[in-house]
């Protein structure tokens, strides 16, 4: 009996080893053919890839399908422009789905060292718009319904893990004058997505993200780290935040609440967020001109409070109610190697919308005060009806000695700034009064004087020199008294 059992086990082991070795060879051509067919059916671009491999050993009893050096290059106007360059793409595929042949079930997707280069031209053409136009017509409605079903059956996603490692992405929108760059992005998404109720874990970290719009830098090599745990009701598309952590540089936020997806890209939500830290230094780290490699050494004082919410229904032009409150009290900061500081920083900002139309949003910067190297500056801004006819009420008062900037903030190598800006300006009115040249209906008063201003930067091909500008603001006109 034992000899018989041993003989049977021996045969089973041999058959299993043979399967591990032979099955990848048997089904390799079938899977490769399917992948190539899917690519060629859906893109208008030059797609190429290097070595590929199919194995059962690393993920038995599933297949691991790997493709190296996947490249997507534009054609036509974007001839020679690389859209994507992926170091390696790994798919873990359910073995039985390959054997049955009706569809291929994908369980794990790994994208290693991808490089993305997105470009939007000045006339709005995008190099990522590579999907082939549908050749279906209204004359043949049967084809419109049946053909997509046949295509979608080729692959079925039942993901357990999705991972991107070491991604580098650039987005250059020349029409919108916007640029974003992401360096060393890593993302992992895990969970049993075949279950109706599951826990989802997601982690994202970015070593450096830069964002510029209209020449203004909003983020300069900022660090991002996000860890989220969600309780997911996949049947009802409802996701509840449990444990989570959102960090941008040194600002750490916590999120609480839920989000539920529905038809027509609609969404219901009840979400709140707030800072997990009360140090002024955390929000100071978001200022591109201040955040640098030696930011850790910056001496700061002051208290921070930041909170917000979004609650309600979002669909089309309908938005949920939302709000944001930011408060900074009695703050200051100083670089240890520089002689001067910024003191007495007081900030109060509120954003509120009752929901529905975004035009109901109100932005209120009620307090914004600081003293730069003992030079005080104050401003206040109130904005209403931002989507239709923006209403603005604002004032700016103070003196900024640009010569003192280098004594407060370390400038970039090659940058130079000098001069004096003095202002005391008030204004109130709607944008329509300017658009319709009804200047008498836009209230403005005060004076702006700029003297002996010099500015040089490695980002500018020329130097800016202003001997003097003197401008008076009045209810019906603006007078340029002097310019040199």
Image (tube, rainbow, N blue to C red):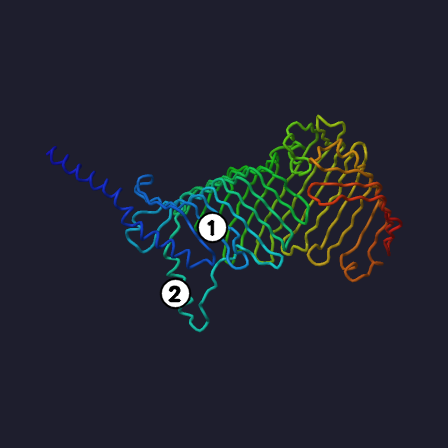
**Residue 337, percent from left and from top:** 71, 26
Which image quadrant for residue 60? top left
The residue indicated by pointer 1 is 237
Instruction: Judge from the rendering whether residue 241 lies leftward or rightward of residue 407; answer left or right.
Output: left
Query: Is label 1 in contact with label 2 (beta carbons under 8 Å)?
Result: no
Q: Is residue 351 shown above or below 150?
A: above
Instruction: Judge from the rendering whether residue 47 lies leftward or rightward of residue 455; answer left or right.
Output: left
**Residue 270, percent from left and from top:** 56, 47
Towards the viewer: 231 or 288: 288
Towards the viewer: 371 or 59: 59
Q: Earlier in the sequence, mark 1 or mark 2?
A: 2
**Residue 415, percent from left and from top:** 72, 37
Q: How many marks?
A: 2
Residue projecting furthest to the bottom: 139
Which image quadrant for residue 422? top right
Instruction: Judge from the rendering whether residue 189 lies leftward or rightward of residue 367; answer left or right.
Output: left
Q: Quadrant of the N terminus?
A: top left
Mark 1 vs mark 2, foreground winner is 2
Towards the viewer: 114 or 280: 114
**Residue 173, percent from left and from top:** 61, 52
Q: CA distance from mark 1 to mark 2?
A: 27 Å
Q: Secondary structure at mark 2?
A: helix
Residue projecting furthest to the right: 481
Q: Find residue 417 and name its label.
A: none
Q: Is residue 408 shown above or below 107?
A: above
Mark 1 burial class by Cα count in 10 Å: few <14, some 14-19, many 20+: some
Mark 2 burial class by Cα count in 10 Å: few <14, some 14-19, many 20+: few
At 62% from the left and 33% from the top, the residue drawn is: 277
Q: Secondary structure at mark 1?
A: loop
The residue indicated by pointer 2 is 146
């Amino acid at each position: 009996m034992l000899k018989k059992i041993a003989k049977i086990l021996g045969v089973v082991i041999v058959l299993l080893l043979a399967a591990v070795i032979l099955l990848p060879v048997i089904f390799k051509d079938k899977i490769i053919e399917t992948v190539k067919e899917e690519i060629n059916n859906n893109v208008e671009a030059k797609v190429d890839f290097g070595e590929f491999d199919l194995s059962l050993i690393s993920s038995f009893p599933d297949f691991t399908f790997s493709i190296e050096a996947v490249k997507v290059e534009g054609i036509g106007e974007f001839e020679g422009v690389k859209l994507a360059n992926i170091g390696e793409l790994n798919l873990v595929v359910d073995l039985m789905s390959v054997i049955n042949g009706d569809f291929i079930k994908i369980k794990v997707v790994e994208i290693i060292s991808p490089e993305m280069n997105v470009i939007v031209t000045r006339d709005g053409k995008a190099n990522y718009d590579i999907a082939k136009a549908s050749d279906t017509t209204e004359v043949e409605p049967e084809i419109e319904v049946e053909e997509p079903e046949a295509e979608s059956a080729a692959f079925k996603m039942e993901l357990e893990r999705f991972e991107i490692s070491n991604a580098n992405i650039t987005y250059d929108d020349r029409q919108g004058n916007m640029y974003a760059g992401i360096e060393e992005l890593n993302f992992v998404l895990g969970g049993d997505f075949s279950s109706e109720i599951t826990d989802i874990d997601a982690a994202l970290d970015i070593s450096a993200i830069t964002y510029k719009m209209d020449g203004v830098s909003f983020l300069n090599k900022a660090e991002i780290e996000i860890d989220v745990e969600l309780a997911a009701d996949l049947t009802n598309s409802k996701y509840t935040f449990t444990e989570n952590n959102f960090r941008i540089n040194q600002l750490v936020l916590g999120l609480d609440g839920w989000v539920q997806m529905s038809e027509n890209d609609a969404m219901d939500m009840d979400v709140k967020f707030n800072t997990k830290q009360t140090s002024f230094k955390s929000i100071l780290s978001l200022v591109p001109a201040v955040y640098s490699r030696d930011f850790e050494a910056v001496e700061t004082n002051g208290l921070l409070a930041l909170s917000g919410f979004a609650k309600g229904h979002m669909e089309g032009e309908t938005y949920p109610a939302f709000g944001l409150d930011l408060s900074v009290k009695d703050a200051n900061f100083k670089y240890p190697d520089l002689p001067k500081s910024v003191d007495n920083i007081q900030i109060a900002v509120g954003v509120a919308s009752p929901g529905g139309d975004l035009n109901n949003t109100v932005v209120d910067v009620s307090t914004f005060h600081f003293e730069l190297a003992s030079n005080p500056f104050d401003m206040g801004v109130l904005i209403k009806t931002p989507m239709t006819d923006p209403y603005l009420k604002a004032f700016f008062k103070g003196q900024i000695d640009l010569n003192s900037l280098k004594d407060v903030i370390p400038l970039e190598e090659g940058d130079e700034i000098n001069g004096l800006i003095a202002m005391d300006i008030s204004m109130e009115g709607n944008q329509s009064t300017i658009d319709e040249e009804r200047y008498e209906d836009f209230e403005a008063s005060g004076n702006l004087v700029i003297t002996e201003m010099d500015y040089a930067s490695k980002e500018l091909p020329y130097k800016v020199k202003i001997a003097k500008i003197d401008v008076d603001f009045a209810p019906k006109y603006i007078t340029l008294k002097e310019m040199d």
